[in-house]
Image (cartoon, coloured by chain):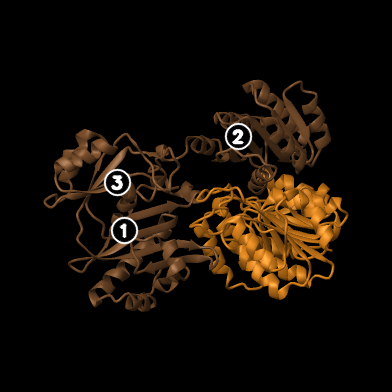
Amino acid sequence: MSVLIDKNTKAIFQGFTGSQATMHAEQCIAYGTNIVGGVTPGKGGQLHLNLPVFNSVKDAIDSTSADTSVIFVPARFCKDAIIEAAKSGIKLIICITEGVPVLDMIEVIDVMKNYPDVRLVGPNCPGVISPGKAKLGIMPASIHKEGSVGIVSRSGTLTYEAVQQTSEVGLGQSTCIGIGGDPINGTSFIDCLKLFEEDEDTKSIVMVGEIGGNAEEEAADYIKSHVSKPVISYIAGVTAPKGKRMGHAGAIISGGKGTAQDKFNALNSAGVKVVTDLNLIGSELVKIL
Amino acid sequence: MNLHEFQSKELLEAYDLPVSKRGIIKELGDIDKALKQINFEKGCVAKVQAHTGGRGKVGGVKLCKDKQNVEDFVNEWLGKQIVTNQTDQIGLPVNIISVDELTEIDSELYMSLLVDRAEKCISMIVSQAGGMNIEEVAEKNPEKILKFKFKGGNETDVSDLKEIAQSLNFTDDQKKQFFSIVQGCIKLFVEKDLSLLEINPLVVTTSGDLHCLDAKINIDENALYRQAEIEKMRDPSQEDQREYEAKKHDLSYVSLDGNIGCMVNGAGLAMGTMDTIKLYDGDPANFLDVGGTATKERVSEAFKLILSDKEVKGILVNIFGGIVRCDLIAQGIIDAINEIGVSVPIVVRLQGNMSSEGKTLLNNSGLNVIGEDSLMKAAQKIVELVK
C-alpha cells in the first residue's frame, strides 16, 4: 500500500501544454503513472503527448473520470485553477507552482472548506510519489526505491536528500509527500503523519522541516498522542538569521518565533529522533528501527 | 517588501484612517516647505525614515520646538547611517526625514493585522500595552493581548468586534472610530496584498479621538506583480545591496557573517548546507538558492554575487541534480569560473543524475575546483581549505 496515490490514480495536468508541465508529464508517464489527459483553456480537442487536452477540468473529468490533478499554471492563475479543480470534483489537487500570493491561498482555503473530501497538496512543492506505483511531481524518479519509509517535507531538494539516504540504507519509501514551503498550504505535517500512521506498509516516518511558523511544533504535539511508528526529523535553518526570508516564503523567523531550536525542543519532547546533521538521516533512522 | 513609515501613512490616509499631517525632507532646502505642510505652532516630531524599529532609542525620533531644532535634527541625521538594536553595525542610510504634526496623547494601544499561518486567515491583534514590544507583552502578559480572526473576504461584521471594543473600555464614540479603523485596515490589507500592518501605537488623544501615530507595513513579494504602485515605493537604499542585486537576477540570497560562500539549488537544501558547514566548524557567508535550473548564466551571476563579498575565502557548491543532468551543471560551473575568474578554492558536491560524470569533469578541469559526491566530505573539505 501507499498513501494518496497509487496504480489506480487517474491524473490530469492543469497547464498541460506549458513547457515545464510537458517535461514533467513525460517523466511521470515514463514512470508508469496513469496520466489520462490535461487542461489548457482554449486548446481543448487537441492531442498533447498523445493524450487529450480539455478546455476545463469538468470536461476532463467527464471524459476521463480523472480523480487527481497536478497544477503547473503560473502563480497568478493558481487560485482559480485550484478552485476550479475542487468544484469540478477532483479529489486530490497537487499544486507545484511557486510564488502564489498568500492572500490567494487564504481565499482558496476558505473556498475549500465547502469541499471537505478534497485534498490540496502544496503549493510550492515537489509533489507526491509512491515509488513503484505512481509519480505526480517534479522529483527525480531514479533516487526512489519501493519500501517502508513515509517521507514528508516542506522542502524539495531536502526531500531528495532524505529519499536518497533511505534508499541507500535499503529501506526505500512507501510514499513521499512534499507539502511545500509557503506559509499557508493545503496539507499539513499532521495530515501526512495521520496517513502514514494508518498505512500498513509505512513502517517509519521521516519528517523534514525548516524554520518559520509552528507546523513542526504542532506536529510534535500530534506525534506524542497519535503516532506509534518511529519518527525521525531534520530541521533546516539552525544558522538562519532572524527576520530574513530564506528563499521559501514560509521560512522566516519572525518575532523570535519559529527557530530551529524551538522545533528541536518540541520534537525531542515528543520522542522524535532529531538529527542535526543532514547527512545522517538514513543511518540514524536505521538505528532506531 | 517593506515600506517607510511615511509611505505607510500615505496608504493609511488613502483608506481614510486618521494619521498625522506630515512634511517630507530629502535635503536641507526642503525644511521650509515641509513645515508648511503642518500646523507648527507647538512644534513637531522629526523622524528618521529607515526600515528599522528602535529609532527613538538612538535619537532618531525627536520632539522639535522650533525651526532651529528641526534644522539641527536634519543636520545631525540626513546623509548619515542609523544603527539600532534591529540593524547590523553598519546600519541603514538616512535619506529621508519626516516632520509630523504634534499629537497630544492620553493613552496608547497596539494594533496589528497579519497573515495567521496556524489559522490560515488574516488575524488582528490588539493590546492596551501600546508602544511596547509586542513579543514581550505576549510573553509576560498574554492576557493583555486580544485576537480577532477575519472570516473570508474583507467584509467585517461590526458586531463581531463589539467584544474587543468592550474590553478596551472605549466610549461609544471611540467604538465607532475603532470599527471604522478596523474596516479601513482590513480593506487596505486585502486590496494591497499586505503581509503585515502594524499600528504601534494607536493612540487615544487628549480630545478622546483614536489616531494612528506610527505605522509599519510589509507587502507580500509574491503579489507585487499586481501592485505596481506599491512596487514603485521600493527604496533599494534600505536593502542589502547584494540581496537587491540577487533579486534582479531571480536569485534568492541572504548575507551572513562567515567566510564560506554557498551556492545551492533549493531553499531547504541551501539552509541545510549552511547548517552543515557550521556543524563542521566553518562559517557560511551567505544563503543562496540558484533555483531548480542551475544554468551557466545563473551560476555565473551567483558566483559574481558571492565573490562581491570580500570576506569569502572559499565556495561550496551543492547541487542535487534531480532531473537536470549533473555533467551539464559541472560544465556550466567550469564555463562560469573560466569566464569570471575565481581565485578562491571551490568545492562542488554533485549528486543525482550523471553525478560521477560531472565530478570527473570538474576534477579534470585544471581549475582550483574539487568535486565530491557527499555533502559531509564536501563541507569538511571547504572548511579545511579556508583555514
Residue A266 position (above or below residue A169): below
Residue holding disc 2:
B259
Q: Residue A90, how many percent across, how many down? A: 68, 66
Point 67% across, 41% down: residue: B281
Q: Is residue B59 above or below residue A284?
A: above
Question: Mark 2 or 1, which is nearer the eye?
Answer: 2
**Residue A207 sits in quarter:** bottom right
Q: What chain letter is assigned to the residue under label 2?
A: B
Q: Quadrant of residue B314?
A: top right
Q: Which residue is mark 3?
A: B59
Report the chain shown in brown. Answer: B
**Disc 3 to disc 2: CB gap under 8 Å:** no
**Secondary structure type for disc 3:** loop
Amino acid type, mark 1: Tyr
The three-letter amino acid code for the residue at tag 3 is: Gly
Instruction: Count all numbered tags in the image, as a single digit.
Output: 3
Q: CA distance from mark 3 to mark 1?
A: 31 Å
* Residue sitting nearer the eye, A70 or B304: B304
Q: Earlier in the sequence, mark 3 or mark 2?
A: 3
Q: Residue at x 67, y 68 (%)?
A: A269
Q: Residue at x 47, y 35 (%)?
A: B241
The percent position of residue B167, horizontal first and vertical second, equals: 34, 77
The mark nearer the N terminus, 2 or 1, is 1
- Label 1 sits on residue: B15
- Marks 2 and 1, how far apart in space? 47 Å
Horizontal and vertical percent for residue A287?
83, 59
